[in-house]
Image (cartoon, rainbow, N blue to C red):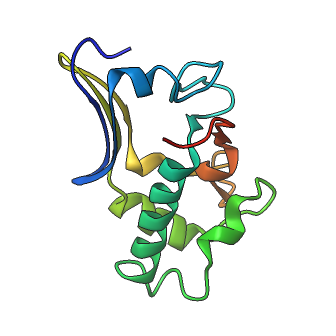
Amino acid sequence: PPSQGTVNITLGDKLLKQYSPEEWKTVGGDSCPIVDSGTGGLVLPQELLNGVVQEATNIASNQCKAQCQNIDIELYHNPHNSFPKSCAVCINTAMPDFVADLGSNKKLVVSGSTLFYETTPCSGEYLNLLATMRLSTHPSM
């Protein structure tokens, strides 16, 4: 839990959500909030996941338009759909970091460059990290 004040969730310079210490304790329901389990990704409330998806969509439509033509980020939430390499690499280059600022110089940072990952080295097949993120079943605050 945060040691003092609010918990700010940002994506680059954009504030996605601000939680009071009391709200933060309930974000993950029965599990810990926003934890990188190392096996299933992150537990995120839907509103935070929506913010990440929206940013990836904006990047695909703007900075990566040439590489991501006719690509709908929403369709790649299925872990069985591989993503075109040129589009994945472009979005990874432009994607800002996801940060949970817990105060007292304690931060959980997920590098934006890890949003898409190659399934196996040299495979040329990329999956969207969002496809492997687990959604919290707890209602958003």
**x and y, in percent, of residue 59 in the image:** 40, 72
The residue most toward the left is 104
Q: Is residue 117 above or below residue 20?
A: below
For the point 53% across and 65% down, which residue is it?
88
Residue 99: image quadrant is top left
Q: Is residue 139 visible from the viewing direction of this image?
A: yes
Return the residue nearer the eye: 33 or 126: 33
Residue 51: image quadrant is bottom left
Q: Is residue 27 above or below residue 128?
A: above
Q: Is residue 88 left or right of residue 41?
A: left
For the point 44% across and 85% down, which residue is it?
65
For the point 52% across and 24% down, which residue is it?
26
Marks counted in the figure total: 0
Q: Is residue 110 above or below residue 76?
A: above
Q: Is residue 115 visible from the viewing direction of this image?
A: no
For the point 61% across and 88% down, which residue is it?
70
Quarter in which the N terminus is drawn: top left
The residue most toward the right is 80
**x and y, in percent, of residue 67 in the image:** 49, 81
**x and y, in percent, of residue 105 in the image:** 18, 19
Q: Is residue 139 above or below residue 46?
A: above
